[in-house]
């Protein structure tokens, strides 16, 4: 989720003031998966290769995190 910019993860948590709880971390992963599937489905239905690639990228990063 933060793969391309680990500095943003550090900045986020510094500004947020705490790490995410286990439930929040789980919700973030689920919402990220939903976003990736949404990009993929929309890209396929609209024949938009950029959205298909974005969907694949989100899901790939999620599974390698």
Image (cartoon, rainbow, N blue to C red):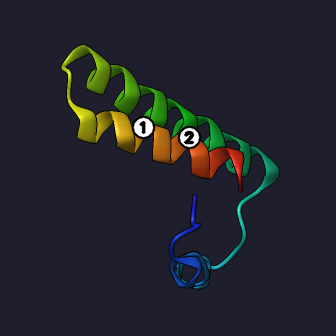
Q: Residues within 10 Å of mark 2 (few under 14, many from 20)?
A: many
Element class at badge 1: helix
Q: Which residue is mark 2?
A: 59
In the picture, residue 35 is in which quadrant? Answer: top left
Position of 33 compared to 25: left or right? left
Along the line of sight, the residue nearer the viewer: 2 or 43: 43
Element class at badge 2: helix
x and y percent of residue 4 in the render? 51, 71
Q: Which residue is mark 1?
A: 55
Q: Residue at x 50, y 30 (%)?
A: 34
Along the line of sight, the residue nearer the viewer: 30 or 56: 56
In the picture, residue 38 is in which quadrant? Answer: top left
Q: Residues within 10 Å of mark 1 (few under 14, many from 20)?
A: many
Position of 27 compared to 49: left or right? right
Vertical position of residue 58 compared to residue 8: above or below: above
Vertical position of residue 17 compared to residue 33: above or below: below
x and y percent of residue 2 in the render? 57, 66
Check whether the beta carbons of the residues at disc 2 and disc 1 lie within 8 A of each other: yes
Q: Quadrant of the N terminus?
A: bottom right
């Amino acid at each position: 989720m933060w793969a391309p910019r680990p500095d943003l993860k550090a900045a986020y948590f510094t500004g947020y003031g705490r790490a995410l709880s286990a439930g929040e971390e789980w919700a973030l992963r689920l919402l990220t998966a939903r976003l990736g599937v949404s990009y993929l489905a929309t890209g396929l239905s609209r024949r938009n290769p950029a959205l298909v690639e974005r969907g694949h990228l989100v899901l790939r990063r999620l599974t390698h995190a």
